[in-house]
Amino acid sequence: MNDRPQSAFRLEEIIKQVEGQRHPPVERWNPDFCGDIDMAILKDGSWTYMGTPIGRERMVRLFASILRKDEDGKTYLVTPVEKVGIRVEDAPFLAIAVEDVGEGDERAFAFTTNVGDTVIAGKDHPIRVETDDETGEPRPYILIRGRLEALIARPVFYELVAAASHVDVGDGRVALRLTSQGEAFDLGSVSMEDLSDA
C-alpha cells in the first residue's frame, strides 16, 4: 500500500502536463518587422481584430502560441518569416483557475490560463503584485513564458489570499505570503483589523 498523499500524485500529473506543452520556438525566430496590425488583446483577455471580437477559440489559441514580448516592451505575433505588432491593454493572458496541490515543502499552485496554458508558480513562473496608485487595488500577475504574463483573475486571487500565510510586518499590518515549489511570493499586506473582521 502506498502512503503518499493523493495531492502528491496530482502534483506529478500536473508537472507531466506542463512538460508536455509545446509552443513554437518564437524566441529563436528573427524575421523582419512588417508593421503593426489592428489586433488587440483587451483587459478581460478577449481578442479583437479591427475592432471585431475574435470568437473562434481555436484561432485565439493559435495566435496566442506565436506571441512574443520583446525587450522594447511591445508584443508581437511572430512566425519564421514575419513579425507584426499588436496592442495589449494589460497582460496577454488571463489566469482563470488555480489548483492547490502537494503538501508541506512540495505544496504548489498550478494556474490555467484562458488560452489553455498551465504553469506552476515557482522560480521560473513568479507571481508579482502591483498596486493601483489611485484605487489601491492589487493587480496580480504570473509569468507564463518568455516575457508574457497572465493577469490573475480576481476570484483566483482571492483563493491565493485565502491560502496565504500571515507574516507580521509591524505597524499593525500583516503581509500575505504564498509559497509554491519552495518560492515565497508577497501578495500584499492588510491591517490586522481587516483580518479580524474577515
Image (cartoon, grey):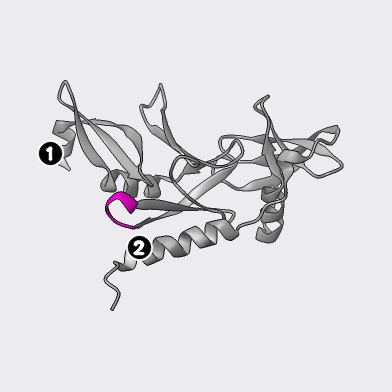
Q: Which residue is located at x 65 percent, y 59 percent?
A: 57
Residue 20 included in the magenta stretch of the image = no
Q: Residue 188, position in %: x, y?
A: 32, 31
Q: Which amino acid does label 1 sit on?
A: Ser
Q: Which residue is located at x 40 percent, y 22 percent?
A: 134
Q: Which residue is located at x 45 percent, y 39 percent?
A: 123
Above or below 195: residue 191: above
Q: Which amino acid does label 2 sit on?
A: Ala
Of residues 18 and 169, the one nearer the viewer is 18
Q: Residue 49, position in %: x, y?
A: 74, 45
Q: Residue 41, position in %: x, y?
A: 64, 42
Numbered tag placed on residue 8 in the rendering:
2
Between marks 1 and 2 in the image, the one whose residue lies nearer the viewer? 2
Q: Residue 28, position in %: x, y?
A: 75, 40
**Mark 1 to mark 2 CA distance (whole Å):** 33 Å
133 displayed left or right of 196: right
Say if residue 53 shows up in the picture: no
| Labels 1 and 2 touching (C-beta < 8 A) | no
Chain-order first, disc 1 or disc 2:
2
Q: Splitting the image into 4 quarters, where does residue 139 fall?
A: top left
Which residue is disc 1 drawn over?
196
Q: What stretch is highlighted in magenta?
A: 102-106
Q: Splitting the image into 4 quarters, where does residue 12 fall?
A: bottom left
- Indicate the secondary structure of the residue bearing disc 1: helix
Q: For the image shown, how many numbered marks are present on the structure?
A: 2
- Indicate the secondary structure of the residue bearing disc 2: helix
Say if residue 159 shows up in the picture: yes
193 displayed left or right of 121: left
Give the dominant element type of the magenta stretch: helix, strand or loop. helix
Residue sitting at the far front: 1
Q: Which residue is located at x 84 percent, y 40 percent?
A: 82
